[in-house]
Amino acid sequence: MLSTGFFKTHRTLLFQILFLGVCIALAVWFVRANAGEVRQILPLLAHARLDCLLAGVALTGVYIWLQGLMYVFSFRAVNRRLPILTGMSLFLRRNLASTFLPMGGLTSLAFFTKRLENQGFEKTNVHVASSIYAFMGIFSVAVVALPVLAWGAFYETTGRLDWLVFLGLVGMVGALAWAARSLFSKGLVYRFLAKRFSNFEKDWAVMRSEKVDRGAVWAVLLASIGIEIVGVLHLYLAMLALGAKASWEAALVGYVVQVLFLTVSPFFRGFGVIEVSLSYVLTRLGYDAAEGIAIMLLFRVFEFWLVLGVGVPVGALYRRR
């Protein structure tokens, strides 16, 4: 019989397993509820246009390059030079880890810092650069989402749930901004961290002494917006590849809705939730159920599975070294 101590020690892992089970159950329910449409999508996928598939794969390469570029400029913001290949490798490894971590998009930023420190980067440099990367990544979603959702609301292509998720994202950005202000003014967040971590005050003083290059910070934001543009192009290419009606309106709204769910999803990079929400949005925008599911699946291959697949050998190579 398992003791209470076991559950306390492994509660995060157990919760992750439970959440993964819920996601898998959601995916199974989704497939069973749309069994007829799932059978119809196989011919669509089998006859997908090769040129569009190759273009989608090439854009995935651009996506990884832009993620690496975000890291390059994030480190440049703290006056440190990071090679683009190192930035791309760092993204791929952290992206792989984030799939299995709670709030993986943020918590994974604490991983894979040792090698950077061995290359001469100070720990504070790495943490400040990673914080810039994370904040600008979230901020760019808000920058892109607001006009698209407003436009979609005017033409009645976005729903109440989309706006609730967007408000959740705005709340997240606001909370991060408040936490940053509290840190700089030595408020509640500063006092909490100083009490919790013995070396925090010393590390924070070192971080405050860093001069941040604002031009590089803006470059991080531009690279992040470029990533959002690649996402829209991926969804548009998925429509073209499957012979469905390719619509920029649908690509913009569909991408924004799924990336909102991805940003606020606490586990497994939105697995299950994104698939259902994107398929639903596409059907609401005029695609039949089979087309919506097929487009969603191909889009997820471009944006998620290919990136994850590239990250596996990169992570394995890193461990061997």
Image (spheres, rainbow, N blue to C red):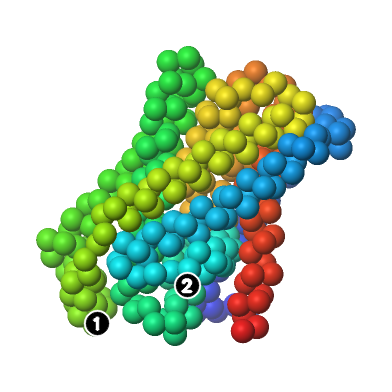
Residue under the image location 52 percent in, 69 percent down = 86
Does residue 155 sit above or below 216 in this rendering? above
Left or right for 130, reference 176: right
Residue under the image location 44 percent in, 61 percent down = 71
Residue 199's tag is 1
* Quarter of the rendering containing residue 198: bottom left
CB within 8 Å, label 2 to label 1: no
Residue under the image location 18 percent in, 72 percent down = 209
Left or right for 173, reference 145: left
Residue under the image location 33 percent in, 56 percent down = 216
Left or right for 145, reference 16: left
Q: Looking at the picture, which amino acid does disc 1 mark?
A: Asn
Q: Residues within 10 Å of mark 1 (few under 14, many from 20)?
A: few
- Pinpoint residue 200: horizontal percent, then vertical percent: 24, 77
Left or right for 140, reference 319: left
Does residue 277 sit above or below 58 in this rendering? above
Q: Looking at the picture, which amino acid does disc 2 mark?
A: Phe
Which quarter of the rendering shows the C terminus? bottom right
Q: Nearer the viewer, residue 112 or 277?
A: 112
Does residue 3 sit above or below 213 in this rendering? below
Q: Nearer the viewer, residue 65 or 241?
A: 65
Mark positioned earlier in the residue sequence (2 or 1): 2
- Pinpoint residue 226: horizontal percent, then vertical percent: 48, 43
**Which residue position holds label 2?**
111
From this viewpoint, is residue 173 visible? yes
Q: Residues within 10 Å of mark 2 (few under 14, many from 20)?
A: few
